[in-house]
Amino acid sequence: MTARRGGGPTMQDVGRLAQVSAMTVSRVLKDDPGVSEATRERVFAAVDRLGYRRNQTARSLRLGGSGMIGLVVTNLANPFYSRLALGVQEVATEYGFRMLLSNSDEQADREPGLIDGLIDHQVEGLIVVPSGSRQQHLAAAMRHVPVVLAARPPAGLETDCVLVEDFHGARGATACLLAEGHTRIAFLGNPPALYTGAERLRGFWAAHEEAGIEPENALIRQGLVDAATAEAATLDLLRGSAGPTALFCTNNRISQGAIRALYKTGTTLPLAGFDDFDLSDVLGLPLTLVSYDADEIGRQAARLLLDRLGLQDGDPPAPRRVTVPTRILRHGIA
């Protein structure tokens, strides 16, 4: 069975045509005896009319299972992970599943316990944003349930994942600053051990190489974990004798810390970075932001997981990698 990738009818489409909820469609496909015969007939008529793949979907619901999938994110306070979770929940609900959510708080030593706890609660599959590069505990979990990774790739694992165009997004945003004549661009990044931090630095560096400009190592700050550390790093750069003429930030929290530092020092510099954020278009600052659909990362991860759950026979497909595209937004730039 292949999960819907955006082209075919959904369970919600069937429900609208049959004038029932998506949950009722799910109950019909699971042969729930509590559904009336008249409702059952309407649902199956809608399934046939729309060409909805009812047999495969019914298999994907894994009759007799718990009907739950687990999601582990690294920082629920970050709006990115909240949106990702909403995307997972949207698809899980569409297919009659419930979602159990855990937050590792970027603590790699905490993640194995969260994974074990979700498996103990009999989740049928897991979607995980890994908090580090050591993923042996995920290999152990895969002996019990399918696992899909989101936002960060597998390390030594053979499993599906959903990623963002980190390299291309960073290269594109940096290129915008370089095209405006900036040759002293500061890089404010999260820990280099994280895939996103490494890929976004690689994109930043590639844009410089393509422009024939050497980035200044003295303007590169890595290992920033929140707005406070980003603010401190930015203040340090601004107080230097040869400060930057523009900033590149690798995520929304780092951008917010950098903006606070600019405000405190009364400085206006162009800033480029990953993640759009609320009120970015009304700050009056020259901003170049790499935007993408965080909900879609969750939706794609959930579809990959439900696809795995629907495989009852035959050889499973090779691990798949889905990439969510980025786009450049520009605010406060004439």
Image (cartoon, rainbow, N blue to C red):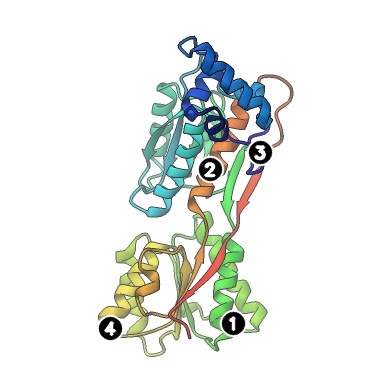
User: Which residue position is annotated with label 1?
Assistant: 214
Judge the density around disc 4: few (<14), some (14-19), many (≥20) Cα neighbours within 10 Å: few
Q: Nearer the viewer, mark 1 or mark 4?
A: 4
**C-beta proximity under 8 Å, tags 1 and 4:** no
> In the rendered structure, which amino acid carries the disc numbered 1?
Glu
The numbered mark, 2 or 4, whose residue comes first in the sequence reads: 4
**Distance from label 1 to label 4 (Cα)?**
27 Å
Q: Secondary structure at mark 4?
A: helix
**Distance from label 3 to label 4 (Cα)?**
53 Å
**Distance from label 2 to label 3 (Cα)?**
15 Å
Horizontally, residue 113 falls left or right of residue 16, namely left
The numbered mark, 1 or 3, whose residue comes first in the sequence reads: 3
Where residue 275 appears, x then y in whole percent? 46, 62
Judge the density around disc 1: few (<14), some (14-19), many (≥20) Cα neighbours within 10 Å: some
What mark, if any, has residue 299 been given in the picture?
A: 2
User: Which residue position is annotated with label 4?
Assistant: 265
Q: Nearer the viewer, mark 2 or mark 4?
A: 2
Where residue 75 appears, x then y in whole percent? 37, 49
**Distance from label 1 to label 3 (Cα)?**
48 Å
The numbered mark, 1 or 2, whose residue comes first in the sequence reads: 1
User: Which residue position is annotated with label 3?
Assistant: 8
Q: Nearer the viewer, mark 1 or mark 2?
A: 2
User: What residue is shown at x 43% (from left), y 43% (from top)?
Assistant: 86
Q: Nearer the viewer, mark 2 or mark 3?
A: 3
The numbered mark, 2 or 3, whose residue comes first in the sequence reads: 3
Horizontally, residue 168 falls left or right of residue 192, namely right
**Distance from label 2 to label 4 (Cα)?**
41 Å
